[in-house]
Image: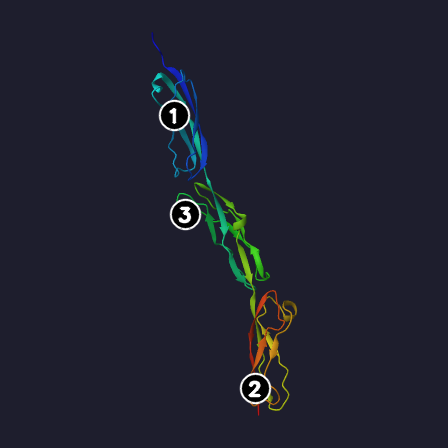
Amino acid sequence: MTINSAPLTVSVHGGWRYYGGANPTFTNTIAGLVNGDTVTVTDETTAVPTSPVGTYPVTATVSGAKAVNYAIYVADSTLGVHPVVLHIAAKNEAVTYGQTPAAPTAYNLLGFVNGETASVVSGVPALSTTVTSRTPVGVYQIGVNVGMLTAANYIFTTWASGMGNVQVYKAHLKVTANDLSMHQGGLVPSLTYTLNGFLNGDTAANAMTGAPQLTTTVSSSSRPGRYWIIVGAGTLASNNYVFDRVNGILTVQP
């Protein structure tokens, strides 16, 4: 009597993963075992973490003492390797009120795998800002677009928390006490000051409030000499300017 091999079918279940990741654990379905037999199924693929994006066959080998009693058919499957997402993060920029900022160009790419760097990427993203020389002091978001970025094993996305900002800082406005003179025994003149450094057509009337506090130790009885006129902050305030205070000189003549 001839005993023929029993048919045994192993159906491999495929899967997917991202480029640079570990292969998933494959599963399979075995049909045709008889008499309580068991066999060992080892799934195999040529894909490794550095394998490029694409589709790879997944097959299996069957082993075990009872395997010789079966005519084995393996139904192969596939492993899909998907591209990894790289996040585009614009770098923060800064400019002083009144200056025209350069177009933003600095950025980082986050999410590389397999030890790769930006050297595997070609093209640049499109970065933009609405900041001009007239933009008030504040923080303004840099717009980020994928632009011309391409890479073999990556796709690109903008990242809300990585948009980047342009910080507009206050410009410097000089508050200088005017130099004055008087004669000993005379009246102390009114202390005055000059403002220098306004930008964008700003004036004291529309770009600031308050006034500095000007003080001196000179009195009518002060001896001849040169005395400081001290410029204090007073009530000075401005949204777009910081104040640099420069003291003046009051000269008492004989």
Q: Are marks 2 and 3 in contact (CB under 8 Å)?
A: no
* Residue 189 x %, y %: 63, 84
The correct choice, above or below, for 189 with respect to 56 in the image is below
Along the line of sight, which residue is nearer the eye, 157 or 12?
A: 12
Spatial separation of the CA atoms under disc 2 and disc 3: 67 Å
Identify the element where label 1 is drawn.
strand
Disc 3, SS:
loop
Q: Amino acid at mark 3?
A: Thr
Which residue is disc 3 drawn over?
A: 117
Residue 22 vs 103, above or below: the answer is above
Relative image position of residue 80 (x, y in whole percent): 45, 33
Please tell me which of labels 2 and 3 falls first in the chain. 3
Residue that numbered label 2 is attached to: 251
- Mark identifier at residue 130: none
Residue that badge 1 annotates: 41
Residue lying at the far right in this picture: please name it.
Answer: 205
Labelled pair 2, 1 in contact (Cβ < 8 Å): no
Question: Cα distance, mark 2 to mark 1?
Answer: 102 Å
Residue at image point 43% right, 30% down: 26
Q: Amino acid at mark 1?
A: Val
Left or right relative to 176: residue 68: left
Q: Position of residue 87 (x, y in %)?
A: 49, 46
For the residue marked with disc 2, what is the amino acid? Thr
Left or right of residue 117, residue 202 in this image: right
* Residue 102 image offset from top left, x and y in percent: 51, 59
* Residue closest to the far bottom: 254
**Residue located 40% across and 29% down the image:** 58
- Which residue is farthest top? 1
